[in-house]
Image (cartoon, rainbow, N blue to C red):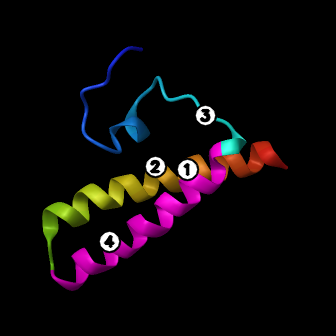
Amino acid sequence: MGKCTLPPNSCLNCGYLRTNVNFLPVFKDELERTVKVLAKAKQYAWEVQISMNETIKENLEKLVQSLEVTNE
């Protein structure tokens, strides 16, 4: 698609995202880190970070679930 100028994690919302089960560990790791960031954001009531990371978490959960089904 060429050079992407979107911020990090935007690819999780991109209709052009293509991946496979080889990247499942990467997405699981990213999900784990996102859950930690989200917990800290909630602890300090950082509303913007909560909103952004909730969306990232939901998208990662869907992606991981989809890849796990594919992998079975």
Amino acid on which the number 1 mark rests in the picture: Lys
Residue lying farthest to the right in this orientation:
72
Tell me residue 65's x, y (percent): 65, 53
Mark 3 closeness class: few <14, some 14–19, many ≥20 residues within 10 Å: few
Per the model, the C-alpha gap separating discs 1 and 4 is: 17 Å
Occupied quadrant, residue 6: top left
Mark before the other along the chain sequence, 3 or 4: 3
Callouts 2 and 1 close, C-beta under 8 Å: yes
Label 4: how many residues lie within 10 Å, few (<14), some (14-19) or many (20+)?
many
Determine the main secondary structure of the stretch shown in magenta.
helix
**Residue 36 percent coordinates (x, y):** 38, 75
In the rendered structure, find residue 19 and report the number of the disc placed on it: 3
Give SS at disc 3. Answer: loop
Which circle marks residue 38 in the picture?
4
Amino acid under disc 3: Thr
Q: CA distance from mark 3 to mark 1?
A: 13 Å
Write the start and end of the magenta stretch as one range: 23-44
Identify the element where label 4 is drawn.
Answer: helix
Question: What residue is at 25 percent from the left and 55 percent from the top?
Answer: 52
- Mark positioned earlier in the residue sequence (2 or 4): 4
Determine the residue positioned at 44% across, 55% down: 58
- How far apart are labels 2 and 1 at the CA level? 5 Å
Q: Which residue is mark 1?
A: 62
Mark closer to the observer (2, 3):
3
